[in-house]
Image: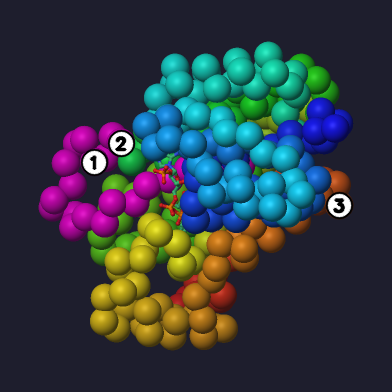
């Protein structure tokens, strides 16, 4: 049954925004491959959530920060399914660090997962899509932090800016093959990534006030934008950057 479904790979889908994207794409009929770091074990919560809504999902272990791990995951995808219809580069880390405390290892790991991993996943996915003549969808989860500074994100912001420019470049490369490449830029979304930050007195209130809508986003808000870009109706949208931030960016222009 599931082999008739379109296949979507979502990186970093064991929790947070990636898990919501996996659930939403599964609700839209995709067979979802739930990527997660092998060291963290099976992403049981995401798999169970997809199953409970009648969907189909499988774990796709790989550390996206390591090229050999990415390539091994894609060779499994080629072998097992022989196709890929959508890739969502969502995996990311954001260790909050003051600018003068950022070590070379912090810079390297953040870039390896957030940007280099997304590049090699995109390259591998595009090879499968082009070979199959699939009008595929490639989406990077960038951030509002690509456009504005963050006091503890000097190593993170450039990875998110890099994703936008990388998607623009791939949009040019892959447009003739009918593949669209876009970036989504979330504002503050409540996930395990920022749970401690939001728990600190005053932070939640000031972030809510920073939006036009007066509340923080949820993972499903980003998942809805991904689902839209995966629709056939979105075929003319490529190289675009879509803010999903409750109006935070526009409020502070
Ligand atoms: P999160 O809750 O920390 O989830 C990150 C996910 O990435 C987890 O599933 C994690 O797996 C996975 N991951 C980490 N390193 C990985 C690796 N080397 N290989 C494969 N997967 C890996 O974060 P989130 O808030 O959902 O963020 C998702 C994306 O949205 C990130 O790219 C982030 O930069 C972006 N974003 C988030 C916000 C926000 O406010 N939350 C705003 C803008 C942009 P494990 O849990 O198993 O380690």
Q: Which residues are magenta?
A: 88-109
In the image, residue 213 lies at what x, y percent?
Answer: 57, 83
Q: Residue at x 28, y 51 (%)?
A: 95
In the image, residue 54 lies at what x, y percent?
Answer: 76, 49
Q: Work out whether 124 lies above or below 32.
A: above
Q: Which mark is residue 233?
A: 3
Q: Is residue 51 left or right of residue 1?
A: left
Which quadrant of the figure contains the N terminus? top right
Q: Is residue 192 left or right of residue 179?
A: left
Q: Residue at x 49, y 36 (%)?
A: 42
Q: Which mark is residue 84?
A: none
- The stretch drawn in magenta includes residue 159: no
Q: Work out whether 75 lies above or below 179.
A: above
Assess whether mark 3 and mark 1 are in contact (beta carbons under 8 angstroms). Answer: no
| Mark 1 vs mark 3, CA separation in Å | 40 Å
Q: Work out whether 118 lies above or below 71.
A: below
Residue at image mark 2: 109
User: Secondary structure beneath disc 1?
Assistant: helix
User: Secondary structure beneath disc 3?
Assistant: helix
Q: Residue at x 45, y 81 (%)?
A: 208
Q: Work out whether 237 lies above or below 7.
A: below
Assess whether mark 2 and mark 1 are in contact (beta carbons under 8 angstroms). Answer: yes
Assess whether mark 3 and mark 2 are in contact (beta carbons under 8 angstroms). Answer: no
In the image, residue 35 lies at what x, y percent?
Answer: 54, 36
Residue at image mark 1: 106
- Disc 1 residue crowd, few under 14, some 14–19, many 20+, Cα 10 Å: some
Q: Residue at x 50, y 71 (%)?
A: 249
User: Secondary structure beneath disc 2?
Assistant: helix
């Amino acid at each position: 049954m599931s082999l008739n479904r379109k296949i979507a790979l979502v990186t970093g889908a064991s929790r947070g925004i990636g898990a919501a994207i996996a659930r939403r794409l599964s609700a839209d009929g995709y067979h979802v491959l739930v990527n997660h770091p092998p060291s963290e074990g099976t992403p049981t919560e995401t798999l169970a959530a997809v199953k409970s809504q009648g969907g189909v999902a499988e774990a796709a272990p790989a550390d996206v920060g390591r090229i050999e791990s990415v390539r091994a995951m894609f060779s499994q995808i080629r072998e097992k399914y022989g196709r890929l219809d959508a890739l969502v580069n969502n995996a990311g880390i954001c260790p909050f660090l003051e600018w003068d405390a950022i070590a070379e290892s912090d810079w390297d790991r953040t870039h390896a997962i957030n940007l280099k991993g997304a590049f090699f996943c995109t390259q591998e996915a595009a090879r499968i899509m082009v070979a199959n003549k699939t009008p595929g969808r490639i989406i990077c989860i960038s951030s509002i932090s690509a456009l504005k500074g963050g006091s503890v994100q000097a190593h993170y912001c450039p990875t998110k800016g890099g994703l936008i420019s990388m998607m623009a470049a791939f949009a040019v490369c892959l447009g003739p093959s009918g593949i669209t490449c876009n970036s989504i830029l979330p504002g503050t979304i409540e996930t395990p990534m920022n749970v401690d930050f939001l728990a600190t007195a005053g932070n939640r209130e000031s972030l809510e006030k920073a939006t036009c809508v007066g509340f923080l986003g949820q993972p499903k808000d980003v998942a809805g934008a991904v689902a839209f870009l995966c629709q056939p109706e979105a075929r003319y949208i490529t190289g675009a950057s879509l803010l999903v931030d409750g109006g935070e960016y526009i409020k502070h222009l």
